Image (cartoon, rainbow, N blue to C red):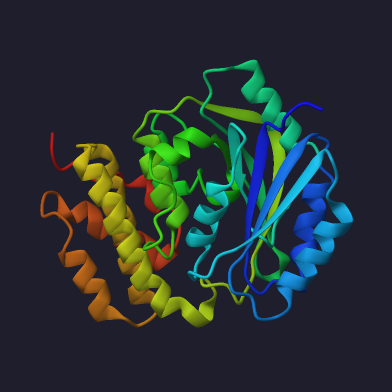
Amino acid sequence: MNEAQLTIVVPVFNRAAIVERTLDSIAAQTLRPLSLIIVDNNSTDGTADVVERWAVSHRSSCFQVTLLNESIPGATAARNRGLEYVKTPVVQFFDSDDVMTPTLCQEVADAFNSNGDLDIVGWDIEIVGPGKRKSLKHFKLGKNPMRAALVHGVLSTQRYAVRTDLVRLVGGWRQDVKVWNDMELSVRLLLKSPNIGVLDTGSKVTAFYVDNSITGNANRKVVNKEKESSLDSCFESLEAARHFVGMSWVNYRRAILAAEYASRGARGDAQRVLSALPTKKRWRYRLIYLKHRLWRRGSWIVKPPVEVQ
């Protein structure tokens, strides 16, 4: 038997009712051999028992299933725990409430095998939102991958696979970043100027909205504060690298966040975020803020000013 080329790392927390849907989609992958690492993150609803029973009934000589535990709360800690045990050249992080098409891993392996210079391979996903509304998100980098990552979330967790040594080189997941941690990681990955490939068109993953996640409406006030912290972390990395265009798009996201604050009645927080933006051509940030506040779309049409050259 050949050694596995790809490992999937799945953190789980209180997903006893739905985690098997995700795991079944991984077990259905046509790629063999395949490695799966599941990291339980202090579940209290019996998730660990569900996962253990599932692993016993599905692991085989060509489908390695490793079960781990991580006591530090948070998906980033669980992902880093799983990353420690990855032995394959390519790793794919995946969420415990989403599903993948059966040929995804094979397509990923084929892409890396056909081009030894690739560092990242991405794909389109379908998002099933509140009310089961569906939308297709394309993996489009355009001329500015940093903008695509910061504005459109192209490198969100379930949308790409990456060389394991690259993730380790940039330090893995930052455990102090609670929200938008995939965006923060994408900034550090892109600062290494990776070679990125894209799978053929068509959704490879279906991502489901889960209301009791940290991004659910019940936690909106806390989430917005954590978003500020995440943007600060992104900005720090970009500033250290003197990536001025990236810094401008972080400020764009700050203007959008100010609009989100205002739309929920937190006008003081909105003004605080706006007043901290650079003074040069601030009218552009005000316009981004107003467009998102009034229409919640089309803000990307207004380009933020590049502050430093």
Identity of the residue drawn at 79% across and 36% down: 103
Q: Is residue 288 visible?
A: no
> 9 or 236: which is nearer to us?
9
Tell me: 261 left or right of 18: left
Give 116 or 299, whichever is nearer the viewer. 116
Considering every residue shown, the one lying at the far left of the view is 279
Q: Quarter of the image holding residue 226?
A: bottom left
**Residue 201 image offset from top left, x and y in percent:** 69, 32
**Is residue 285 shown above or below 216?**
above
In the image, what residue occupies the spot 26% across and 38% down? Answer: 245
Query: In terms of depth relative to the viewer, which is nearer, 280 or 190?
Result: 190
Q: Residue 231 vs residue 123: left or right?
A: left
> Seen in the image, is 77 located left or right of residue 1?
left
Q: Is residue 116 visible?
A: yes
Give percent across and percent down for residue 130.
Answer: 65, 69
| Residue 76 drawn at (x, y percent) | 48, 59
Residue in the image at 66% along x and 74% along y: 14
Q: Position of residue 284 (x, y in %)?
A: 23, 52
User: Which quarter of the image is occupied by the N terminus?
Assistant: top right
Q: Is residue 81 above or below residue 16?
A: above
Q: Residue at x 80, y 43 (%)?
A: 63
